[in-house]
Amino acid sequence: MGDVPEFRPQGHELLYVAIADHLAARIDSGELRPGARLAPERELAVEYGVAYLTVRRAMVELRDRGRILTVHGKGTFVAPD
């Protein structure tokens, strides 16, 4: 498992992209394994210190990248390799 860099978005970087990139790094490092359930979006918003809608947009970004899957009524999970 690799080390995940601390979450420090740069001024020019879109916050939702920074969160998506950080979560992707957590997946790549093995901290979040395929099939693992992610915390609810509202909890992630608290963890990252951002608005709920910012996390929601980051989740859309990760789904678009094929990194996560959302199952209605079940939650959001790390996509299989």
Image: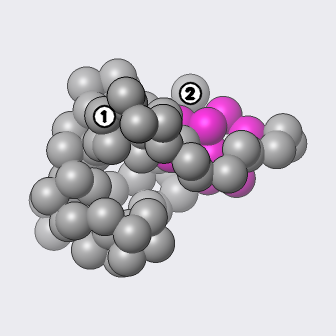
Q: Where is residue 41 in the image (x, y as percent from the top left)?
A: 28, 66
80 lies left or right of 58: right
Q: Residue 81 carries which label?
A: 2
Please name the residue shown 33% across and 43% down the image: 15
| Label 2 neighbour load within 10 Å: few <14, some 14-19, many 20+ | few
User: What x and y, as percent, mark residue 80?
Assistant: 50, 35
Helix, strand or loop at label 1? It is: loop
Say what amino acid the circle numbered 2 marks: Asp
Q: Name the residue under label 1.
A: 14
Image position of 54 with respect to 41: above or below:
above
Residue 34 seen: no
Front position in the image: 11 or 66: 11
Q: Which of 16 and 64 is in front in this view?
A: 16
- Span colored in magenta: 23-34
Identify which residue is drawn at 48% across, 36% down. Answer: 10
Q: Residue 47 carries which label?
A: none
The answer to whether residue 51 is magenta is: no
Mark 2 residue element: loop
Q: What's the amino acid at mark 1?
A: Leu
The percent coordinates of residue 51 (x first, y second) are 22, 65
Relative side of 53 to 33, left or right: left
Seen at 39% across and 69% down, the residue is 49
Q: How far apart are marks 1 and 2 (CA)?
A: 27 Å
Vertical comparison of 69 with 7: above or below: above
Q: Mark 1 Cα within 10 Å, few/some/many (few <14, many 20+)?
A: few
- Left or right, 24 with respect to 44, comes to right
Mark 1 in CB contact with mark 2 (< 8 angstroms): no
